[in-house]
Each structure stands twice: as C-alpha cells, then as structure tokens.
Amino acid sequence: KKPIPSHVPHQKKTRNRLQMRLLALSPTLLLILLVTLFCRIRVMVASTVCEHNGDSSNDQMSQCKMWNRRISKRQSMQYRIISAEACETMAKRIEEAHPDRFTFHPTKWSKFPDGTDNIEIGGFHPHNLLSGEHVLFLASFHNNDVTMSQFQVIIVLLQSFVESLTIVLPYYPVGTMERVTKEGTVATAATYAHMFGSLPSCGRPTRLMVYDIHTLQNRFYLHGNAVASLQTAIPLLKEKIKLSEIDAIAFPDDGAAKRFSVLFSDMDLEIIICGKTRGEGDTRHIVITDGNAEGKRIVIVDDLVQTGGTLYECGKVLKEAGALSVNAFVTHAVFPKESWKRFALGGDRACFDKFWVTNSIPTVT
C-alpha cells in the first residue's frame, strides 16, 4: 500500500482509509451475503416440508399458505380455448361455466377436394388474439386423420407467440402400445411421444394433460419440449360412491389394484382383487385372489374398457361369490364397433347394475 502524502487534506485521508477498509472487507461481506442467501434458501425449502416436530403446525401453516397462493394464482389465470372439432361442446361448456377465465375461439376444420387439410384456427381475426396469452387446446385423437390435423394446429399455435400451451388429451389412445414382442412392430406410444417432444418451443414446455393413462411409464417417453401432466378421474367415482350404498372396490387384476387402491385409502371400503388363472390347455379363468365379495355392494374399477370381456367375467365371478350388487367404472369407454350395446339392457353381458364412464372419448360418449 502506498503511503498517503502529508499534503492531502484530512477529509480526503479519512475517505481513502474508509475505501481501503471497505475493499479489505469486501471478501468478508461477500461471504456474509452468500451465507445469508443460503440460509434464506434453506428456510424457503424447509417451509414447504412438514416436519414431525414441535414446529410442525407452523410448517403446515406455511405450506398451506404457499399452496393457497398457488391455487389462487391458477384460479385467476385466463385462457384462450382452441379445440378439436369433437371437443367443441366441451369447450363451450367450459366458457359458459367460467366466462371470466375462458374464451373459446371456434376453429373451422375442413378439407380441400384432394383430401388435405383446410383449417382456419380461431382467434386470429381481426388480429392475433392469442399472442401473449395462455392457450388451452382440447384434443381428441380418436383416429389417425384427426390426430395429424390437430398436430398441425398445435404447431401453428406454438409459432404464434403464445405465452404457454396446455394440451388436454383425456384419452391417450396409444397408451397400451408402449412395448413390442416382435421385431419391426411399431410402438406407437414411443412415436407419439417423439412427435410431442419435437414440437416447437414457445419459451416453456408444452403441458400435456392425460387422464388415467394405461401405463404410467409412458410419461418418461416424453422428452424435449413436452411434459406429461397425469390426472385421474377417480374423484368423480368417489363422489358417486358417497351417494350410494357401495361398500367394496374390486379390481380386475393386480396391476389395477396397485395403481388405484391407494386412491381409496381415505374411504372405508373392502378391497377385492381378481386375477386370471390358467385352466385346461390355453384357457384362462377369472378368480377372486384377495377379499370377500359375499354380501357386498361392489364397483369394479379400471382405466379403460375395449370389448369388456375381462370386466364381464370379473362381474360374473363376483356375483357367483355372493355380491348383492355389482357395478363398473372405467375412465375411458373405447368400445370399438359399438360393443357397449352388449352391456346395455338385454345384451348378453348385461350383468352390471350401473356402468359409469366419462366423456374422455367424445365420439363414443
């Protein structure tokens, strides 16, 4: 350090000494700031975790406040709705129920004479009303033709300066095709995930909301610009159960039991598990592997139904075991070739007192 000349005024000497002290203390100040910041981060993290100690009530209160703020923010967010043609009724209902939050812009879905798409997306006249807005796209991939058309619309939306894009795809039709046993077979769950992951970016990942996807590992196929947000329709069933005399839940196989039974842990219900056993030759039969159906009012729970053979066999076995009533609930009613008619009154599989489904596939339900 250079000595300060004697001719420098006293005030200037004092200022220089202060500056040197501050420079000398700057590493210490930096360390203090870093420690303070680290402590604040730890406090913020700790406030979101409920620890089972004397301060657990305060932690729970902090967590509740945090979630209330998040919920309040989400509930106040406004969305512009674009929907597939099959979902327009749903879009209108959402707008009517919450006109302060949702605005529906109808889209014209048509074809040129050669069969290619002629689509005019709503919300672009008299100018781009979607720019800077949160957009909700209601999708329905009930066949390959409409799926490709909707992918084209999704790409255009992401290139239209939207703030965010949320795709609501209640039924993921390729969820059962996540693996193959023969070389050369296309695992469409993987190819769909690749298309979603390759979508343009609007600055943040596209949120893909799916209800009761058939295999949970499908979510890990998504990479890049799309993130899966898995939802469930089980709360709808629980509301029905509360208004009924149902006192038991049955699952057609062990996989369904492992997946859904935890969602009923807050209800006093008997859990019954069914499964397949091998008979003579290659035949298989449904049997009750766990639980007692005698005297019970039961609802069978599964994620989807195709032709319903397994559900029917399960219902029949439960009735033979002494169940007073047997009902069924599935989130996705696929029912190819109108196979639902077999479960209707007079059908050869009309063994259920009630058969609950959702409108996740608008072309069927």
Image (cartoon, rainbow, N blue to C red):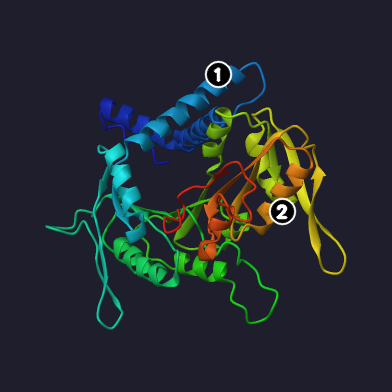
Where is residue 296, by image quadrant?
A: top right
The numbered mark at residue 129 is none
Amino acid identity at mark 1: Asn
Q: Does residue 134 sit above or below 37 in this rendering?
A: below
Left or right of residue 94: residue 342: right
- For residue 74, which quarter of the picture? top left
SS type, badge 1: helix
Using the image, determine if residue 320 lies above or below residue 153: above
Task: Give whichever of 54, 265 is nearer the camera.
Answer: 265
- Taking 258 as reference, is 277 above or below it? below
Task: Tell me the residue that label 1 is attached to.
Answer: 58
* Residue 285 on image: x %, y %: 80, 57
Residue 97 image offset from top left, x and y in percent: 31, 37
- Can I make out residue 194 in this image? yes
Report whether 241 appears left or right of 315: left
Residue located 67% across and 20% down the image: 53
Give the side of residue 292 with respect to residue 233, left or right. Answer: right
Residue at position x 27%, y 32% in the image = 8
**Which residue appears farthest toward the right when viewing the image?**
280
Q: What is the CA distance from the residue labelled 1 to the residue labelled 2?
A: 52 Å
Name the residue that disc number 2 marks.
Answer: 313
Answer few, some or many: residues within 10 Å of disc 2's Cα (few below 14, many 20 plus, some between 14 and 19): some
Report the front residue among 28 and 198: 198
Task: Identify the secondary structure beneath mark 2.
Answer: helix
